[in-house]
Amino acid sequence: MITRIREVRKARGLTLEGVAARCEPPTTAQTIGRLETGTRTVSVKWLNRIAAALDVQASDLVDLPASEKVPVAALVGPDGAGAPSRPLTLVPPAVPKGALGIRMTAALGDYRAGDELWCEPLPPERFADALNRDVLVPRPAGRFLFGRLIGRDGAMLHLLPLGIGMRQQVVNDPAWIGLPLRLIRDL
């Protein structure tokens, strides 16, 4: 099996040591290097561990003939734009398992009309992970609220809508909330 572990690792700006430390449980840089070069067999278990450490899907680490690669033409920083010193590629986003989508039909807060948000559904025990973040909250009869989660009081969630002059909303005990993880925006 041909892997893209090295390519994805470098695209993420991580060293062998960095990936090894982020693995659960941690491993050694030497092991990651051997998996990258193919001197050690890559199992599905290893692919899943490394994918989690790199924050990608395991399928992103396998070189498939039909997979698209986006070459990096320039690196832009405080000193301007310049060519990369070595070939780099971008990892196209993969759809996270169980993801929910939001499409903005009008400008609201930091979002523009046409923006798409990929959300992770969170169960109630993970609501604290979304404090001070924008969230999608289901309401009865197929309705939703979208706003900044500013507080939680027991089963009550306090949301600040993103529109100007809108009042705080309180939602009692939703079954889940959607936490946006990725913004897709056409320029």
Image: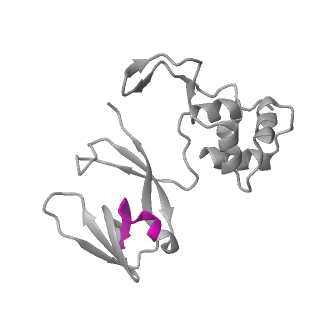
The answer to whether any part of residue 144 appears in the image is no
Colour mapping: one colour
Q: Nearer the viewer, residue 87 or 138?
A: 87
The answer to whether any part of residue 118 appears in the image is yes
Considering only vertical position in the picture, is 140 above or below 5?
below
Q: How many marks?
A: 0
The quadrant the C terminus occupies is top left
Query: Was residue 60 drawn as part of the magenta stretch in this picture?
Result: no
Q: Position of residue 79 (x, y in %)?
A: 37, 23
Query: Was residue 134 drawn as part of the magenta stretch in this picture?
Result: yes
What residue lies at 37% left-to-right and 61% top-to-bottom?
135
Q: Position of residue 76 (x, y in %)?
A: 41, 25
- The reply, left or right, for residue 54 in relation to residue 73 is right
- The reply, left or right, for residue 77 in relation to residue 160 is right
The quadrant the N terminus occupies is top right
Q: Position of residue 59 (x, y in %)?
A: 67, 40
Q: Which residues are magenta?
A: 128-140
What residue lies at 33% left-to-right and 43% top-to-bottom?
115
Q: Identify the image quadrant of residue 90.
A: top right
Q: Position of residue 81 (x, y in %)?
A: 40, 19
What residue lies at 46% left-to-right and 74% top-to-bottom?
175
- The reply, left or right, for residue 130 in relation to residue 95 is left
Q: Nearer the viewer, residue 156 or 115?
A: 156
Q: Nearer the viewer, residue 73 or 118?
A: 73
Considering only vertical position in the picture, is 80 above or below 14?
above
Considering only vertical position in the picture, is 72 above or below 45?
above
Considering only vertical position in the picture, is 149 above or below 90?
below
